[in-house]
Amino acid sequence: MGIKGLLPLLKDITCDFHLRSFSGKVAAIDVYCWLHKTVIFCVEEINFGIEATRYIDMCMKDTDLLIENNVQPILVFQKKLGGKANVESSSANLLLLRTTARIMKNLAQKV
């Protein structure tokens, strides 16, 4: 996943920071990547058609962390990426749509 060897190449121009340092800013988040990263924790449930929400909860926890540190998240749900287009199936698209709806509902309840 991602570009192999990218982080070591960027080591000289990166620095550690606390999320609070972005207080008052806006952050655009590629939620597709967050979902892809967290869905591994409930892959068995999804595979057997059992409703699973742990991966959504993990994405919401990260979103809440941004909000708690006064960073306004803009969640971007871009499902069609050139490199991933051949990997996506109709069931993956359906899962993404359901997940998007749940995350948006959770965010709406917080406002």
Image: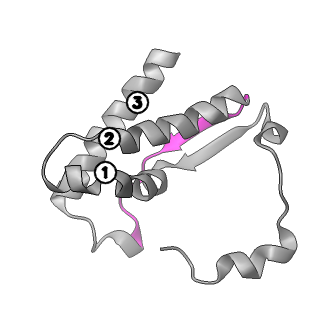
Q: Label 3 belongs to which residue?
A: 104
Residue 78 at what x, y percent from top left?
42, 53
Task: Residue at 47%, 25% (x, y): give it.
Answer: 107
Q: Amino acid at mark 3?
A: Met
**3D distance between C-alphas at marks 2 and 1:** 13 Å
Q: Is residue 30 left or right of residue 35?
A: right
Q: Is residue 44 left or right of residue 100?
A: left
Q: Amino acid at mark 2?
A: Thr
Q: Are marks 2 and 3 in contact (CB under 8 Å)?
A: no
Q: Residues within 10 Å of mark 3 (few under 14, many from 20)?
A: few
Disc 1 is placed on an element classified as helix
The percent position of residue 67, horizontal first and vertical second, equals 64, 29
Q: Which residues are magenta?
A: 70-82
Q: CA distance from mark 1 to mark 3?
A: 20 Å
SS at mark 2? helix
Label 1 sits on residue: 42
Which of labels 1 and 3 is toward the front? Answer: 1
Q: Secondary structure at mark 3?
A: helix
Question: For the residues marked 2 and 3, what is the alpha-carbon distance in whole angstroms?
Answer: 9 Å
Q: How is the image coloured?
A: one colour
Q: Is residue 17 left or right of residue 79?
A: right
Residue 49, given in percent of the width and then of the height, sits at: 13, 48
- The image's mark for residue 99 is 2
Identify the residue at horizontal 77%, vertical 76% (top origin): 10
Residue at screen point 43% across, 47% down: 77
Which quadrant of the figure has residue 19? Answer: top right
Please name the amino acid that badge 1 sits on: Cys
Q: Tell me which numbered mark, 2 or 1, is placed earlier along the sequence.
A: 1
The answer to whether 74 is drawn above or below residue 34 in the figure is: above
Horizontal side, residue 5 vs residue 53: left or right: right
Kindly indicate whether the residue at mark 1 contacts the one at mark 2 (C-beta within 8 angstroms).
no
